[in-house]
Image: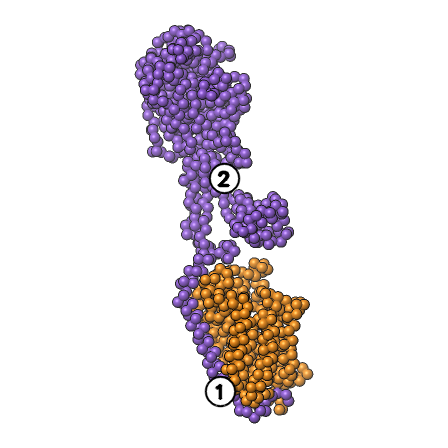
Amino acid sequence: MIAAAVRAYTPRTQPDRLLLGALVAITLLGLVMVASASSAVAARETGNALYFFYRQSAYLLCGLAAGAVVFAIPVRAWAARPFLLLALALGLLAVVLLPSVGHTANGARRWIDLGLVSVQASEPARLLLILYLAGYAARRRRELVETWAGLIKPLLFVALAGVLLLLQPDFGALAVLAAITGLMFFIAGARLMHLLVVGALGATGLAIAMVSSPYRLARIISFVHPWAHANNTGFQLTQSLIAIGHGDLFGVGLGNSVQKLMYLPETHTDFLFAVYADEFGLLGTVVLLLLYLVVLWRGFVIARRALDSGAWFAGFAGYGLVSWLGLEAFINIGVNMGLLPTKGLTLPLMSYGGSSLVTVCVVCALILRIDAETRSPSTEASP
Amino acid sequence: MNQPRNTTGLPAPGRWRTAAVFLLFVAAAGGLAGRAFFLQILDHGVLTKRAQSQYMHTISVPANRGAIVDRNGRPLALSAPTQTVWAVPSALLKAKPTTLTQLAKRLKTSRSDLKKRLKAHQDSQFYYLKRQLSPFKASRIRKLKAPGVFFKRAYKRFYPAGPAAAQLVGLTDIDGKGVSGIELSANQTLAGKPGKRHVITNRPGQVVDELGYLTSPQSGHSVKLTLDERLQTIGYQALKQAVAKHQATSGALVVLNPQNGHLLALASVPSFNPNNRSSIAPAALHMRPATEVMEPGSSIKPILISGALQHNLWSLSKRIHTHGYWRLNSHLTIRDDENYGTEGLARILKKSSNIGAAHVGLTMGAKRVWQDYRQFGLGQTTDINFPGQRAGTLRPFTKWNRTDTATASYGYGVGVTPLQLARAYAAIANNGILPSLKLIEGQGGRTRAPAHRVISRQTAMTMRRLLKGVVQPGGTAVRAQLAHYAVAGKTGTARLVRNGKHTKKAHRAIFVGMAPAANPALVTLVMVNNPTRGSYFGGTVAAPVFKRVMREALHIMGVPPSPVKLAASGRKTVEVSG
């Protein structure tokens, strides 16, 4: 089977250089920033200033290995067993809720402890769900476009995943999943009227979930008036704003951020961008936004090419995956700059964390595989 | 295969949909860039100020306190760097038990005690674990890397001369500020100016970067005293032994150079160890030469007689007849220890006759006596600026009646400090010029009373000749006699006041003298309060101290010996009068 897979992929073309270049640039920037932003916390907690850097490097190697394996698998393999994907995704989200399996950090049960490493269940689960949705859109496109039922059936599974995510709770992951679902169905051609109605219902549900929990409400309040709560609930956000504002046009230089010296919590994970903006300034911010836009642009081009060549699953998956990357990146940056309430979302390819990094590596591998397949039709084998 | 291809027969989705989604992303990126511009450029100033207000701090850097040295540069007070160890209790309580045990051990306490103290201050962000720790011990604690433990540089004061100069040199408080003695009076010179340092701290308050000095600390200047540490130590030891030997309560000693008024020794007993302050008795804190007001008794007589001679109110040849007592009026009967019969000035001084002194004083009159005492600086603070120095009491003569004038003539009803009395004798030693006293070198131009002539050179020389008789056989202070130097001096044995009355049971023994008598290099005063064992006379308690100190002091000061006619007659019991 492996031999078949290897045979299946015989590259005729170079990968998309712009995409690959942007991804490598973001990844390297991420590694450097993890080293810089975590040094103080790492030194204090472990005695080794590079502790998180070494771990992140190891995660990256895992991610590259996983990416290499995924890259070797033909895209169509992922569409072969849609319900297996769905079952795996929901299974992950359900299993993490079991007290004996999932363990809790910061008040949310999000992690599956595998001994050596912990896996954040929602990351692979969302990847699997996106692939399932892409497959559904490709297989049942006519139903999706023409009937209510065709639109609502897959949404029921998404809603189920949503409920499981809320039980963790992981509201941020749910919001992103909902947005990606809507986006994919919109691209797949669902009727605007249908989408609006379902979207409005979904948004109402999300809003109720948001307001119903006191901690999320507190986050929203502190998000609206961060300086009024600068010493408690607004502390993280105000410290993030201070760090970003401190950066000026060119930044204070790599390694020179003071805010990372225990002023700003979560510097190497959710608030890595704030330290980056402090050290590289507005110029760095714009460069980073452009890098993510390049990824989006190339991703969209690749997905479109797949659709045009008739590979609908690959196309829809491409749109979904690259949008997921872009959405998480922009939401994370928006949170850092106080435009969105704190969510607990990572900056893809940059934030410290194995689950996120490996998952994102797999996502990138999938996009590159789609690119490779659509540009070398011979690898499609015989239809 | 399973790859779902275009099996639905539908056309590919419209391009406008994907274009719209992409544009949405571009718009979002634009919005984020705009927000970044707003934060990083427009709000940069405000946010940077907020950032700096939390990470930039001004830290005070202690200045090295100047040393106090004697005239030869020997240290009397020195500052050595120490470390202050403090903690954020809540953070330290989270340390590993082994770390806490180690830390407690190095702080010389137990873990449970340390924990108890930390818990008591749990809500505080600052708690002193130990102050004035030696740099070595501090480094041993630093190696533990205990959480929430911090270090601060400080200085500790050391006093090499120990108890010998304790009251004179004085003390600093734990913050390094002078609180007594020279430490207090010269604090401004010694203290220097603490510097200010701009630093960047992390959130727990540890300094992570230096932005440099705002002002660097200026070390204090050292203060050089006129004191001679060797004389000070010799004087203190001799005085201390005399006080112990005679079971006295306290004592004072002054050695000065009469020619320039430099104070060479100022000792006070009881004393304390300034390097170990755990138990300092209040009585030990007095710098008695400057702070004790005493009735000088007979030791005032040379001042009185100097005035009488100077103003030609009594001649050297004038004689009076005494009978051992003199009933002046219904209030006062003046007594001598025995009937000295017919006496002139030489015999009045040699035998210390109160009746003779009263005759001289009454002849001079209250105004003249008062004026002369005042001329000699009695009842006025001296020029040294010592904290707690007292002025003494010299009531205006207009309030003196005949009794007051008579008693003032032999040293009662007049309150002087040992310093004042020593300075008055220095005028006799210095050929009539009353020197301005000096304790700190290089401090000129601020004297309240510059050196000035109080008696003629002739009178001063005559007085020294008369005072030589006091240590000659038959005088009150043969025990002050030195082998190789001629000594001039005078005893005093004053009754102490108990419950408002002079008592026969408690005395103050005084001897003030100078040597060599022909051209005195040193004046030394010895005073012992309430000697209760053995003898209590100035000639038997104070004079031997004088002798012991002077013998060594003259040698140390390099004063050439002068030929002395040693008395052929041996020691006989010496009569001393009060």
Chain A drawing hue = orange
Query: Is residue B121 visible from the viewing direction of this image?
Result: yes
Q: What element carries label 2?
A: strand
- Marks 1 and 2 in Cβ contact (< 8 Å): no
- Residue at 62% x, 91% y: name it: A383
Q: Which of marks 1 and 2 is in front?
A: 1
Q: In this view, does A176 lie above or below A11?
A: above
**Where is residue B53 shown, x and y percent of the image?**
44, 57
Label 2 sits on what residue type?
Arg
Q: In this view, does A252 lie above or below B344?
A: below
- Per the rendering, the mark at residue B15 is 1
Do marks 1 and 2 share a subunit? yes
**Where is residue B229 shown, x and y percent of the image?**
47, 31
Chain B drawing hue = purple
Label 2 resides on the chain identified as: B
- B333 vs A361, left or right, is left
- Residue at 61% x, 44% y: name it: B109
Q: What element carries label 1?
A: helix
**Where is residue A147 shown, x and y percent of the image?**
56, 88
Q: Which one is in front, A266 or A344?
A: A344
- Per the rendering, the mark at residue B157 is 2
Label 1 sits on what residue type?
Arg
Q: How crowded is mark 2: few (under 14 residues within 10 Å), some or many (20 or more)?
A: many
- Residue at 47% x, 38% y: name it: B172
- Residue at 63% x, 80% y: name it: A85
Q: Is residue B149 above or below residue B450?
A: below
Label 1 resides on the chain identified as: B
Task: Give the colour scheme of this rendering.
Answer: by chain
Q: Distance between the residues labelled 1 and 2?
A: 85 Å
Query: Is residue A20 visible from the viewing direction of this image?
Result: no
- B64 vs A78, left or right, is left
**Where is residue A89 shown, x and y percent of the image?**
62, 77
